């Protein structure tokens, strides 16, 4: 099954493994370098590059891949590099894709971090950050609202949201526990909801 | 060496439990990096989130690299960054190998049905916690209000929102 799919999807994929690995590294390096702010922005860019332009992945298969990576934990950018790399060139493909995707941010942050302590002394930078921090709060409020529109669909969802927020804010419960409990709750609640 | 291992494991934990994108991991990172290990102050964490909006790459990677570098130089940056990535690498290659079609999809969907609302709670919580630290005067609230209107009503790109907020900061403070 898996084997057959690999063959049909692989028609346009370069046969030369070294070349393919280099191309994967290069593609994700460029994507990683240009997706500022990270996250979901990456998906349409990968689709354009690997599905439409290069034709290495079929459109339906790409949709399946994206569905899969959204069902597992991890950073979107990282997950998409891993799944694409793995499908096209196995474990080495996954590793080189994720290396390419993460390298630009790694280097940029290393440079910033090595200067940050000195940067931080300048009043102008301090003032910039004093303004940027409330800006971050605004982005978070906006993100909570737009995620809420998609993520909270019914009364059960509202209940989980409210109890999660209370657990985090007032009871100071570790986020990992909150996530695990909510997953269990979801399994129970939505499973029962589907019983015929 | 012990520190590097501890950093790798902490960031692997963060990578393994991040659902719903960068903002939702903020509470987890705050708990582990700020409260438990004291590798960063909450102030520094907010600054890196702000910087993350202006630089390439996801917040998680940026934070891992920054924290790692600050605590243990280049080896630290490497250990923390590889830590964030490793769980994804394992989980995805295992799933893709054994069942690419993801046969347990409906069961996973039930679980995600519960996790999705809590992702919203995590982001709302991040807004509250960061708001507590970042907002301490009227100017701060003003900047938040302007930035919120810019992003919510006028759909201005987050990079521009952060840069303009910073410029407002220079003008107001």
Image: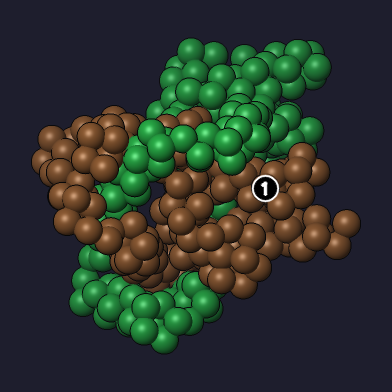
**Which residue is more in the foreground, A59 or B91?**
B91
Quarter of the figure that contains the C terminus of chain B: top left
What color is chain B drawn in? Answer: brown
Q: Is residue B84 above or below residue A54?
A: below
Q: Quadrant of residue B160?
A: top left
Which percent across, then down, holds residue B4?
80, 55
Q: How is the image coloured?
A: by chain
- The quarter of the picture where residue A27 lies is top right
Q: Nearer the viewer, residue A118 or B16?
A: A118
Q: Is residue A166 visible?
A: yes
Considering the numbered disc 1 on the image, is that residue within a helix, a strand or a loop? helix
Q: How many numbered circles does the render carry?
A: 1
- Residue A51 in view (yes/no): no
Q: Is residue A9 above or below residue A195?
A: above
Rendered colour, chain A: green
**Residue B136 in picture, x, y percent from top left:** 27, 61
| Disc 1: host chain | B
Left or right, B20 with reference to A194: right
Side of B76 where B168 appears, left or right: left
Residue located at (49% from left, 45% from top): B48
Residue A32 image offset from top left, x and y in percent: 55, 28
* Residue occupying the point 30% across, 74% down: A161
Q: Which residue is mark 1?
A: B70
């Amino acid at each position: 099954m898996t084997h057959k799919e690999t063959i049909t999807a692989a028609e346009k994929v370069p046969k030369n493994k070294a070349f393919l690995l280099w191309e994967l590294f290069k593609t994700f390096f460029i994507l990683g370098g240009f997706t500022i702010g990270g996250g979901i922005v990456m998906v349409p860019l990968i689709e354009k590059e690997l599905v439409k332009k290069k034709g290495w992945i079929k459109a339906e298969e790409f949709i399946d891949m994206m569905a899969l990576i959204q069902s597992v934990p991890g950073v979107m950018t990282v997950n998409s590099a891993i799944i694409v790399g793995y499908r096209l060139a196995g474990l080495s493909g996954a590793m080189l894709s994720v290396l390419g995707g993460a390298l630009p941010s790694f280097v940029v942050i290393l440079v910033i971090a090595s200067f940050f302590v000195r940067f931080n002394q300048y009043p102008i930078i301090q003032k910039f950050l004093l303004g940027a921090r409330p800006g971050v709060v605004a982005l978070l409020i906006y993100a909570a609202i737009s995620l809420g529109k998609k993520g909270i669909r019914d009364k059960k969802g509202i209940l989980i949201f409210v109890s999660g927020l209370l657990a985090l804010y007032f009871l100071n419960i570790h986020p990992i526990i909150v996530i695990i409990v909510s997953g269990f709750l979801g399994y129970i609640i939505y499973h029962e909801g589907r019983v015929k | 060496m012990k520190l590097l291992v501890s950093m790798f494991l902490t960031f692997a934990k963060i990578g393994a439990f991040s659902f719903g994108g960068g903002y939702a991991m903020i509470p987890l990172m705050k708990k582990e990096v700020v409260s438990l290990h004291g590798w960063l102050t909450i102030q520094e964490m907010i600054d890196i989130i702000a910087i993350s909006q202006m630089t390439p790459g996801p917040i998680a990677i940026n934070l891992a690299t920054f924290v790692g570098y600050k605590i243990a130089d280049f080896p630290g940056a490497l250990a923390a960054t590889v830590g964030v990535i490793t769980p994804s690498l394992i989980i995805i290659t295992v799933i893709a190998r054994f069942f690419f079609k993801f046969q347990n999809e409906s069961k996973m969907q039930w679980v995600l049905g519960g996790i999705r609302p809590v992702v919203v709670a995590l982001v709302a919580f991040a807004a509250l916690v960061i708001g507590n630290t970042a907002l301490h005067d009227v100017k701060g609230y003003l900047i938040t209000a302007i930035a919120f209107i810019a992003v919510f009503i006028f759909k201005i790109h987050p990079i521009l929102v952060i840069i303009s907020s910073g410029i407002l900061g220079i003008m107001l403070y």
